[in-house]
Each structure stands twice: as C-alpha cells, then as structure tokens.
Image (cartoon, grey):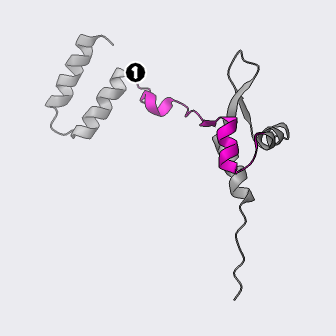
Amino acid sequence: MQMMTFTGCAALLRADASLDNRTRTRLLAALKTDGAPPSDTNKPSTPRVYQRREAARLAGRSLRWIDAIARRGLVRRVKLPGNVRAVGIRADDLEKLIESATVTPEVRG
C-alpha cells in the first residue's frame, strides 16, 4: 500500500467516532502489514543454549557427564550451520532432565 493511501485511511479511521483507540490501532496495523499478524508474534522463539561448562555447573556434574547424556540422547546438542562441533546444550532439555532427577524427601508422619 502506498503511503498516501495509508495516510488517507488513517485519517478516515480517526474521523470515525464509533472506533476506540485500540481498534483503530489494530486496523491500521493490519493495513500496514497487509492483514498479516504483527511480526513479533509471528517469530519463533529461539531456544536458550547453555555452553557445556555452564550446563555442567547447573547440573552439578562434570563435562564428561554432559557429553555422555548428549550421546545417549537425553539432551540435544545445538550446532550452528556449517559447524562440526556443537555450541552447547538446549536449556529446556537440561532443565527437564534436572527436574526429573530431583528427589523429594518423603514426609513420615
């Protein structure tokens, strides 16, 4: 849409007394993006990645243990395109593993 057309539509929407400000803003955003949702809701969230050393510290284990659980497939390694080595371990996988390994004491009464 050309800028002059958009400006004209914005003026018409401002002149309409039946629209509240939130609706007017939503309509203008839809016009600007050709009806697509705003780009921030369309983006996939990037997963947090822990470096091996940080993952080992959080789990209270060694680097060898982190490598072993990654080989067994309990956590996923993250590799960047074109690289052979992984840059780290996915945070959500490590956090699930730590939560599942947490032992809660029994309450005896």
Residue 30 at x, y percent in the picture: 36, 27
Residue 14 at x, y percent in the picture: 17, 30
Residue closer to the observer: 12 or 25: 25
Q: Was residue 69 drawn as part of the magenta stretch in this picture?
A: no
Residue at the spot x=28%, y=38% of the render?
Answer: 23
Relative placement, left or right, of 39 versus 26 is right
Residue closer to the observer: 65 or 88: 65
Relative placement, left or right, of 56 versus 70 is left
Residue 41 at x, y percent in the picture: 47, 34
User: Dot 1 corresponds to which residue?
Assistant: 34
Picture quarter with the C terminus:
bottom right
- Which picture quadrant has residue 76? top right
Other-residue count near label 1 (Cα within 10 Å), few / some / many at <14 / 14–19 / ≥20 = few
Mark 1 lies on a secondary structure that is loop
- Residue 8 visible (yes or no): yes
Residue at the spot x=69%, y=49% of the render?
Answer: 59
Q: Which kind of residue does numbered mark 1 sit on? A: Asp
Q: Was residue 55 drawn as part of the magenta stretch in this picture?
A: yes
* Extent of the magenta region: 34-63
Residue closer to the observer: 109 or 13: 109
Relative placement, left or right, of 21 versus 15 is right
- Which picture quadrant has residue 71? top right
